[in-house]
Image: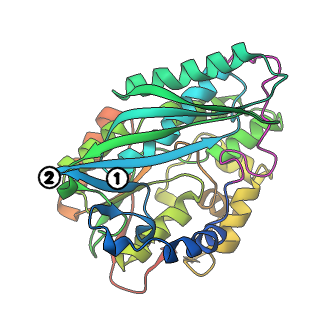
Amino acid sequence: MTLSPIPGLRLTGLASCAGCAAKMGIGTLHDVLAPLKGIFDENANENLLVGLDGADDAAVYLVAPGVAVIQTLDFFPPVVDDAYTYGAIAAANAMSDVYAMGGEVKLALNITAWPEDLDPAILGEVLRGGAAKVAEAGGVIAGGHTIFDVEPKYGLSVTGIIDPAHIMQKSGALPGDVLLLTKRIGTGVLLTAQKESREGCETGYNAAIQSMLQLNRRGSELAREHGAHAMTDITGYALMGHSSEVAIRSGVRLVIDAASVPLLPDAQRFAAEGATTGGGGRNKAQLADRVQITGDLDPALVEMLFDPQTSGPLFIAVPADRAEALRSAIEREMGGCWAIGHAEAGEPMVVVR
């Protein structure tokens, strides 16, 4: 796939963490949010079904019997040079949290920061890309907010709906569950390789773009249909960060087979060459007490496990007797799905071997 670079729109926000726009570390974010829990007594509002106490992918609020809204937002600087593609990727990434909760996207609002000296026509292409992806999801964009900033940023505030009896959360995994991943990982490394103009990165970079553009909509629907116990999406905190949240919230040990984790083309090679991200380093440092790496694993493969993802895969815990049916169904409709491990009783953490 050939993208058309637009003058003035470059990979401006990726020097420290390609693919996740220098997302705040998981430990730091926990500390920053802690004071908010003293302001809002979530237990006093029975309609707030998922909030700060849940540490989940989105908030869920009951609005009527059998109907709850899902609310989330996400935005970041450009991860590709093509304005339309950047907008579409940012939109897919923002909507993924609704799918991680098992919901349907209904409404979105644009969130935009734009330099005064950058052609507004480029912004038009960013917004057009985002709108096209929201339309693909069956939703609608109904407005938004734009400010001037020294660096372009774009994303969405997204509203979805769900039957409160069928909310998917990180807390439902049970011993014996099989762990599925619905896309290959490695976007952070491959975006860094492209930014650094590393030789031979085009194949992996184009594969990363196609992966980031793919909605998690159908994977989410199939997971619900097949009785999945828990689900999240893999984004800035990488496979290790988000899977460890499932382990801790569910009170189970997750065992992941490193050799079974699907990687985007050439991602491991570029990780070995040093095309890693600042975000990956932060993930590794802050997840040391949640993740145990065993065996003699290739250091570049270990880097991939902590690599921040943009619009990444769904991570699903499903009963063993339904796992192959779900894996096959997602593979048919999304092009791939991989069993990468299992849940078992034990200390809540992730063990990689």
Q: Is residue 233 left or right of residue 44?
A: right
Spot occupied by residue 249 in the image (x, y as percentages of width and height) = 39, 74
Q: Within the magenta stretch, is there residue 5?
A: yes
Spot occupied by residue 209 in the image (x, y as percentages of width and height) = 59, 31
Is 208 above or below relative to 24?
above
Q: Is residue 90 left or right of residue 322?
A: right
Picture residue at 55% right of the left edge, 78% below the top: 290
The answer to whether any part of residue 314 appears in the image is yes
- The residue that disc 1 covers is 101
Q: Which residues are magenta?
A: 1-22
Q: Secondary structure at mark 1?
A: loop
Picture residue at 36% right of the left edge, 79% below the top: 252
| Magenta stretch secondary structure, dominant | loop
- The residue that disc 2 covers is 65
Q: Residues within 10 Å of mark 2 (few under 14, many from 20)?
A: few
Residue extending farthest to the left is: 65
Quarter of the picture holding the N terminus: top right
Q: Secondary structure at mark 2?
A: loop
Q: Nearer the viewer, residue 50 or 265?
A: 50
Q: Is residue 288 left or right of residue 61?
A: right
First of labels 2, 1 by sequence position:
2
Q: Is residue 66 left or right of residue 137?
A: left
Q: Nearer the viewer, residue 322 or 65?
A: 65
Spot occupied by residue 316 in the image (x, y as percentages of width and height) = 35, 57
Residue type at mark 2 is Pro
Residue type at mark 1 is Met
Q: Report which quarter residue 288 is drawn in.
A: bottom right
Q: Report which quarter residue 62 is drawn in.
A: bottom left
